[in-house]
Amino acid sequence: SSPNDMSTFGNVSSKLGIIPSGLCFGMTFKHDGTSFYIAGTNEVIYQHDVSTPWDPSTQTTGTSGSGTFNPSGVQYPFGMFFNYNGTKLFLASSNSTVYEHNLSTAWQISSASNPAVATFALSTVQSTPLYDLVNVGSESRGIFLSPDETKLYLFVRGGNVIELILNTPGTLVDGVKL
């Protein structure tokens, strides 16, 4: 296979079988590739450690993972993203809300705060030009935090991307600008 060329992508050689329910909504990696996180359809987030960075087939923690987190109030976490030092987790949910959770131990999912320390409901954009985009179908499907932590990007059902400018970099606590 050739890098960045999906037409030369080889066959998947194995199935990991690491989610108890067998189904997942989203996946993300720790920035150094030594752990990955999967949001299961049971609304639990699983952390798995790997012996070879960026290679899920080398996961060392079995089906239950090295830690789990069941975020209260979050319906189907379709997307998740950590800030760059691993102390915050942002979840994009099917209930059109973004959740921010603090981690008391960086990158350790079992140390996430519950409930969320801050939330942002997409329904609050109804009086803005973004309403038509959100009204198409506002389930948040993916999420990304800019490297400087000033912007949060949401991919919403219907194929639209919404940019939220954080009033305070790295946190939803002080609100957002559209």
Image (spheres, rainbow, N blue to C red):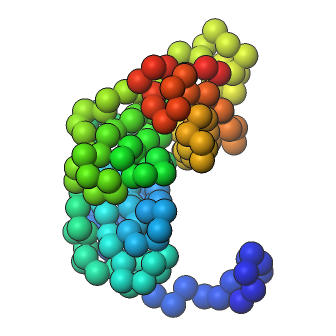
Q: Kindly identify the residue that appears in the image at 45 percent across and 31 percent down.
A: 171
**Up/down of 87 relative to 166, above or below:** below
**Can residue 123 be seen here?**
no
Q: Is residue 42 left or right of residue 162?
A: left
Q: Kindly identify the residue that appears in the image at 60 percent across and 13 percent down.
A: 126
Looking at this view, is 112 or 137 the one in front?
112
**Can residue 171 be seen here?**
yes
Looking at this view, is 144 or 122 the one in front?
144
The image quarter in which residue 45 lies: bottom left
The percent coordinates of residue 144 (x first, y second) are: 57, 46
**Up/down of 76 relative to 129, above or below:** below
Q: Is residue 144 left or right of residue 33?
A: right
Q: Is residue 172 left or right of residue 66?
A: right
The percent coordinates of residue 125 (x first, y second) are: 59, 17
The image quarter in which residue 91 lies: top left
Q: Kindly identify the residue that appears in the image at 28 percent across and 57 percent down.
A: 108
